[in-house]
Image (cartoon, rainbow, N blue to C red):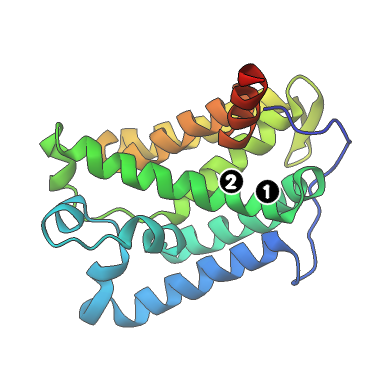
Amino acid sequence: MRPQRRSFRPVLPGVRSAAARLALALVFGSVVYALGHEQFGELLLLIPAAVIQRLWLWQPLSYAFIETTAVGVIFGALILWQLGSGLEQSWGGRRMTLFAVGTTVVAGVLTVLLSLIWPRLQLVPAFAGGTVMASVVWVAYGLSWGNRSTNFWGLPLTGNVFALIGVGFVFLNGAFSTFAAVVPSILGLVLTWGYLRVGGPGEWLLRLQGWRL
């Protein structure tokens, strides 16, 4: 579903904005994990085998606010804060938050289900979802612009190219580690494309109701 065509630019919002709250939640969750990862870290990350065998059903949500490296926390928070503010200007805070968190959670659930038929996913020690959320916000922001001009660190480019850069980051992460480790990000990007191009559940529900009428 395409967003409203109101023009917007990514600017740093106030700390009370939804984008800022998402960024702060990522920082807070990651710090909690860093301080207590030896005691309860495995409870917070996404471990498909633990979700299936131990019924740790909260992990597709808790992993969304965890990053395991300092660089990941910094860049993830900046992306959520800046690009998330751009989406918030166009979509509103509630829709942007539901999209960012919901897409990341659904990607985690699909990863768990996929591990049932692709056991290699259960060999990955754990998944951190901060990168997933940052990636879907990045790509959603680019797709929202479409063929209109935006910029990347001062370089003029279209929104679609900006989105492809976000996809490229996910690909590079997989190439330099293992593609199994970026499965949640890949699933999140597919869901993002579907949301922006086909529409979300709410729009499809309205279409169904209209068809019934």
Quarter of the rendering occupied by the C terminus: top right
Circle 1: residue type: Arg
User: What SS does tag 1 mark?
Assistant: helix
The residue pinned by badge 2 equals 99
Q: Residue at x 60, y 63 (%)?
A: 22
Q: Please give the count of numbered marks on the rendered protein.
A: 2
Q: Residue at x 31, y 67 (%)?
A: 44
In this image, 45 relative to 134: left or right?
left
Residue 57 spot, x, y in % from top left: 27, 60
Instruction: Examine the image and state in which quarter residue 116 appears.
Output: top left
107 or 163: nearer the viewer: 107
The residue pinned by badge 1 equals 95
Tell me the crowding category of disc 1: few under 14, some 14 to 19, or many 20 or more residues within 10 angstroms, Cα based: few
Quarter of the rendering occupied by the N terminus: top right
**Label ID, residue 175:** none
Gap between marks 1 and 2 measured at Cα: 6 Å
Circle 1/circle 2 CB separation < 8 Å: yes
Tell me the crowding category of disc 2: few under 14, some 14 to 19, or many 20 or more residues within 10 angstroms, Cα based: many
Circle 2: residue type: Phe
In the depicted structure, whether residue 53 falls above or below residue 194: below
Residue 143 spot, x, y in % from top left: 67, 28
